[in-house]
Image (cartoon, grey):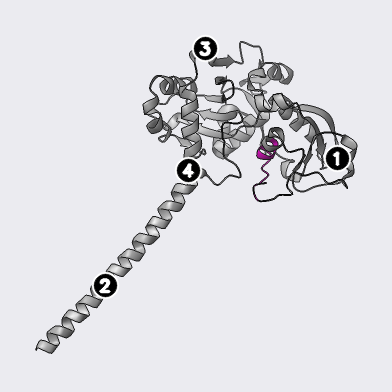
Amino acid sequence: MPKKRVRSKTSKGRRTKLALGVLGLLFGLLVISWSIRFAQNFFGSKNYSWERKFNINLLVRSSDISLFSYNPKDNKITIINVPDETFLQVPNGFGLWQLRSIYGLGGDKLLKETLTNFFAIPVDGFVDLSVLKPPQSAAQLVDTLRKNPLSGVNLLTSVQTDLTMWELLQLKQGISSVRFDKIKTLDLLKFNVLDKENLADGTPVFTTDQIKLDSVLSDLRDPAIVSEHKSIAVFNATNHPQLAQKWARLITNLGGNVIIISNAKSALQKTQVLGEQSSTLKRLQQIFDLDCSNNPKCGKISAMDEDIVASRAQINLFLGEDYANR
């Protein structure tokens, strides 16, 4: 009997150790999973994270759609509300749609791309305030963060967004310090940027005068790019017409100095941005999805490139097939 009891206790001890070992392994796997998820939310999986060196432009979705722009250098905010009836060209071959219908076609990502084309300003992320109870507009969110900065973290973590936690914390800190006289809301209807028309079926819509629109966007110019005044050449390296003109407009609206718009001599599948190391080069690499963090040759000019030698621009953008339908 004593031997059986000893064997029984030994067996139970082994089973207990095995169970504890399995629980420890499961807990370790959970900790690793939580750590990876936290790192993704905090630092993000993009090629870059907003670091308050450049403006940040956001799509804000609530009961209406707004473009929100924060300028950290001048510590000012610009909010542009876009009427739901605005008739917009939607990228990726969707054609023309009213703004109110675009979210249903492709969610926040397609809305971001559409507003990037409409304003010719890079939209860096989205914040969906429609999930709040009650929903808040972009102006109301700014007012809340300015008057009660301590509540900002809880508020910003309650919204849906593609910004990282680190970007949200920096944005909250910046918004909280903006003076009331540094906040501007632009009404496109008051500036006569939008014209009222009717579709063939009688549906009323607003269409855009692109020249008038660009003329009211001076507040969205990025001081980091304006101050450098780098000369920029934009080349279309595809067989799609007007591609260089389209993206040159965006660079110009950012404050860039575009001196050449032309066709490249060779076709490219992937867009390239090459030139002098500068804030302007870095921002263009961000906008055009180029990851240069681990590539020391990224962005450097090759003396053998005929287009670059001929352009004499400090920065050269070659638009490839990856941007043909955006």
Q: Which residue is mark 1?
A: 308
Q: Secondary structure at mark 4?
A: helix
Q: Which residue is mark 2?
A: 17
Tell whether 301 sits left or right of 178: right
Please provide the residue range marked out in magenta. Answer: 284-294
Q: Which residue is mark 3?
A: 181
Q: Earlier in the sequence, mark 2 or mark 4?
A: 2
Residue 255 visible within the image: no
Res. 42 mark: 4
**Is 215 drawn above or below residue 108 in the view shown?**
above
**Is 24 drawn above or below residue 96 in the view shown?**
below
How far, Cα to Cα, is label 2 from label 4? 37 Å
| Residue 182, horizontal then vertical, whole percent | 54, 15
Q: Earlier in the sequence, mark 1 or mark 3?
A: 3
Q: State the residue at coordinates (67%, 35%).
A: 283
Chief secondary structure of the magenta portion: loop
